[in-house]
Image: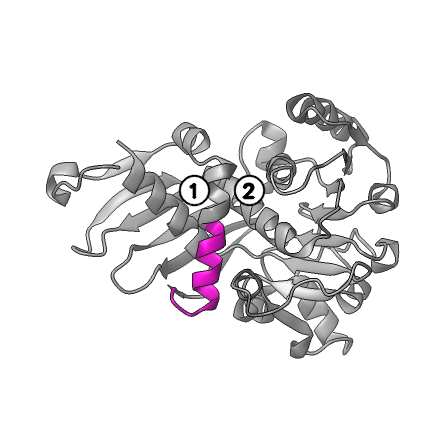
Amino acid sequence: MVKKLEIEERGMRWIDREEVAERLTYEVCLPIVREAMIAFSKGETLQLLRSILPLGEGRMFGVMPGGMGAGKCFGAKLISVFPENFAKGAQSHQGVVVLFDPESGAPVCLVHAGEITAIRTAAASAVATDALARKDARRLALLGYGEQAGTHARAISRVRALEEVVVWGRSVERARAFAAAMGKELGLPVRAVETVLEAVAEADVVCTVTSAAEPILMGEWVRPGTHVNVVGSSFAGPAEVDIELVRRSRFFVDSREGVLAQGGEFLRAKAAGVVGDEHIVAEIGEVLAGDVVGRTSAEEITVYKSLGHVVQDLACGWWLWESGE
């Protein structure tokens, strides 16, 4: 633990991508995210809905301010999303998390936001999977082969004893390359398939981690007992799964307010008159706290809609700052 020096003596610290990746392991991150989401759902944290500035051609700039509660750290994430970066070998999410000291109000740390986002998003899905998926879940389907596909494979493998991973993507060649690399890393059978239907046909857990503007996963394809993490779309408009899956599922969210304002898949189903606001069973923090039951049977389909929230970033960033040298 860092000795608490005066802010003036310590100055502003920069925690780069390499340090985030090295220190923010899933063993560290999962409990941090879990506690952050419990605190969020208990109303102990503070945050505003993210502001998104469209930059054209699918590019965006987002501002996410928040605080961990009275006497705790506060700050903001400033993040750009450039989807084409993946094809260039760079992160699609670029930015910083700015942390402020709760005692002096001074900014104390900047953290690489792209790497925090990659790790904590997958950690949140893993926490939700642990709470909602069947205990005997063994087969994971990844829809998408980008950075979040890799982090989700790593994170989900921490909460379930996976026996197989299946990946689908728009480019079969890239999906095969991803499968080969991930299989070697995880020591598991990882195979690429040509259709979404084939990917999810025998899946116990499905993670949608694409930039799709229109649904790629249809509810009729998802077998009873499956848990689905819907991750790729983070604002109103794009949707990765169809209205039927929303309707069929026991539907959970990271933030009720957030999804009612910015959850593309839910908003489409609501606009079609298929579901109402009451279809949202609970926030995942309520399930984690034991206030709401998650899965109620082995046959039901559960969905976790993830938008990602700044309390996750702040909690992870503050741990990195406070525990660093």
Residue drawn at point x = 45 percent, y = 63 percent: 40
Q: Nearer the viewer, residue 239 or 59?
A: 239
Crowding around mark 2 (Cα neighbors within 10 Å: few <14, some 14 to 19, many 20+) is some
Would residue 36 be counted in the magenta stretch? yes
What amino acid type is highlighted by mark number 2?
A: Phe
Q: Reply above or below: 180 against 86.
A: above
Magenta highlight: main SS? helix
Residue 309 at x, y percent in the picture: 48, 56
Residue drawn at point x = 82 percent, y = 65 percent: 244
Element carrying mark 1: helix
Q: Quadrant of residue 83?
A: top right
What amino acid type is highlighted by mark number 1?
A: Ala
Residue drawn at point x = 65 percent, y = 71 percent: 281
Residue 7 at x, y percent in the picture: 15, 44
Q: Is residue 210 left or right of residue 50?
A: right
Element carrying mark 2: loop
- As measured in the structure, the alpha-carbon distance from the residue carrying label 2 to the one carrying label 1 is 14 Å
Residue drawn at point x = 35 percent, y = 59 percent: 68
Crowding around mark 1 (Cα neighbors within 10 Å: few <14, some 14 to 19, many 20+) is many
The residue identified by callout 1 is 113
Q: Reply above or below: 256 against 52.
A: below
Q: Quadrant of residue 267?
A: bottom right
Residue 57 visible in the snapshot: no
The residue identified by callout 2 is 82
Q: Which residues are magenta?
A: 33-45
Residue 45 visible in the snapshot: yes
Would residue 47 be counted in the magenta stretch? no
Residue 127 at x, y percent in the picture: 57, 50
